[in-house]
Image: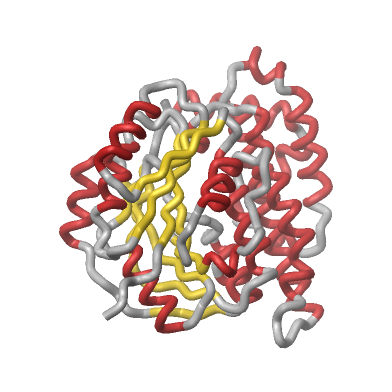
């Protein structure tokens, strides 16, 4: 029996001294037997570089790449440029793979002929949680194959907008790269762009990827200007919606309108999540973010005028969006007060 095709595992890392070694060990313990691991150290200021060198000495299939703090998109792009595998997957340095994740996704592509195969994920905080999941993990064989427009409607718009937990035919990615300068939502845009150049994606009912709830991660940090990226990404995705809908065999006007409404709902929610981040700041710090508060206010007022989008919002978001649009300062104060009470 011939050797399995080479799979390139791209691991971007920034200040990952606490997580990287365990992450790589779990990649190296995959049951799939032909991997190359590309670790992209993006200007780490801790002991990550030394750990990378030690890992490269221990495992002969590791290649090290170094950038100067250019961001996760640039790091993944560097990995793609250097990758030699017929298949590619992405793993964040604080996450972990179950032993057979790559094998399951490869077999899924082999069975379906899809360009991309994805699986579910589980969330963990402590090592014992991960170990417990490994012990009880079962293999599910249910597979669903999507055409690109279907995947956008039924997966991306319902939360499956991650680039990790997926295996890609490298030929399907071709020259496509992650958009630089974006720190939140960049993986969703990568998927949206990818949908425009592939024929099919498959999802297997199996949770093989362990997402570490890192308190130091982007979602756990206080507001920073680059948090506005999630708004920009959904605006770009909405611009792409018509092109994606056109890929469907039957692209009716009402279906396109529904898709645009769904994207607008997610955009409104992104605006409110960003406003919530600002609200958690102290009063003095909120005053420094007046420019971004104004941007969020103007955008929410505009988006609430979109036909049908408001009615599709969950009730809580309807109330919050209306209040923020009408009285942003009062909303931010109330949100901050409520957050302080919860702590």
How many numbered discs? Answer: 0
Q: Position of residue 33 (x, y in %)?
A: 28, 64
Q: Image point 81% across, 79% down: which residue?
A: 253
Seen in the picture, residue 91 relative to 110 is either above or below; the reply is: above
| Residue sticking out furthest to the bottom | 250
Q: Quick check: 104 left or right of 86?
A: left
Locate the C terminus and report the quarter of the image it occupies. top left
Nearer to the camera, 21 or 188: 21
Q: Position of residue 87 (x, y in %)?
A: 46, 65
Nearer to the camera, 23 or 87: 87
Nearer to the camera, 300 or 114: 114
Q: How is the image coloured?
A: secondary structure
Task: Say which quarter of the image contains residue 148.
Answer: bottom right
| Residue sticking out furthest to the top | 284
Seen in the picture, residue 203 relative to 43 is either above or below; the reply is: below
Q: Quick check: 301 left or right of 120?
A: right
Locate the N terminus and report the quarter of the image it occupies. bottom left
Seen in the picture, residue 319 relative to 239 is either above or below; the reply is: above
Task: Say which quarter of the image contains residue 152.
Answer: bottom right
Q: Image point 22% across, 47% down: which residue?
A: 129
Q: Quick check: 85 left or right of 186?
A: left
Q: Image point 54% across, 27% down: which residue?
A: 222
Task: Say which quarter of the image contains residue 241.
Answer: bottom right
Q: Position of residue 71 (x, y in %)?
A: 58, 36
Q: Position of residue 67 (x, y in %)?
A: 55, 33
Nearer to the camera, 236 or 37: 37
Q: Image point 23% across, 69% down: which residue?
A: 138
């Amino acid at each position: 029996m011939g050797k399995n095709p080479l799979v390139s595992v791209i691991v971007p890392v920034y200040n990952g001294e606490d997580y990287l070694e365990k992450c790589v060990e779990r990649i190296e313990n995959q049951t799939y037997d032909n991997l190359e691991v590309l670790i992209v150290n993006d200007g780490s200021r801790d002991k990550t570089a030394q750990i990378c060198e030690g890992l490269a000495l221990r495992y002969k299939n590791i290649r090290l790449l170094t950038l100067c703090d250019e961001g996760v998109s640039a790091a993944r792009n560097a990995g793609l440029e250097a990758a030699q595998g017929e298949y590619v997957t992405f793993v964040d340095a604080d996450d972990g793979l179950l032993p057979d994740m790559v094998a399951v996704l490869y077999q899924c592509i082999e069975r379906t002929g899809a360009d991309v195969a994805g699986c579910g994920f589980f969330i963990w905080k402590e090592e014992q949680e991960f170990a417990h999941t490994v012990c009880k993990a079962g293999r599910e064989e249910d597979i669903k194959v999507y055409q690109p427009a279907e995947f956008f409607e039924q997966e991306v718009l319902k939360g499956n907008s991650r680039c990790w937990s997926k295996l890609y035919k490298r030929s399907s990615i071709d020259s496509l790269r992650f958009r630089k300068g974006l720190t939140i939502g960049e993986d969703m845009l990568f998927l949206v762009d990818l949908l425009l150049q592939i024929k099919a994606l498959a999802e297997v009912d199996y949770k093989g990827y362990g997402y570490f709830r890192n308190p130091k991660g982007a979602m756990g940090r206080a507001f920073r200007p680059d948090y506005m990226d999630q708004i920009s990404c959904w605006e770009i995705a909405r611009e792409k919606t018509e092109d994606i809908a056109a890929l469907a065999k039957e692209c009716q006007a009402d279906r396109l309108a529904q898709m645009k409404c769904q994207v607008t709902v997610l955009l409104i929610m992104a605006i409110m999540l960003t406003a919530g981040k600002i609200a958690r700041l102290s009063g003095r710090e909120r005053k420094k973010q007046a420019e971004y508060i104004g941007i969020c206010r103007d955008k929410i007022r505009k988006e609430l005028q979109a036909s049908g989008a408001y009615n599709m919002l969950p009730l809580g978001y309807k109330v919050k969006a209306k209040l923020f649009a009408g009285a942003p300062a009062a909303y931010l104060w109330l949100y901050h007060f409520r957050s302080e009470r919860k702590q």
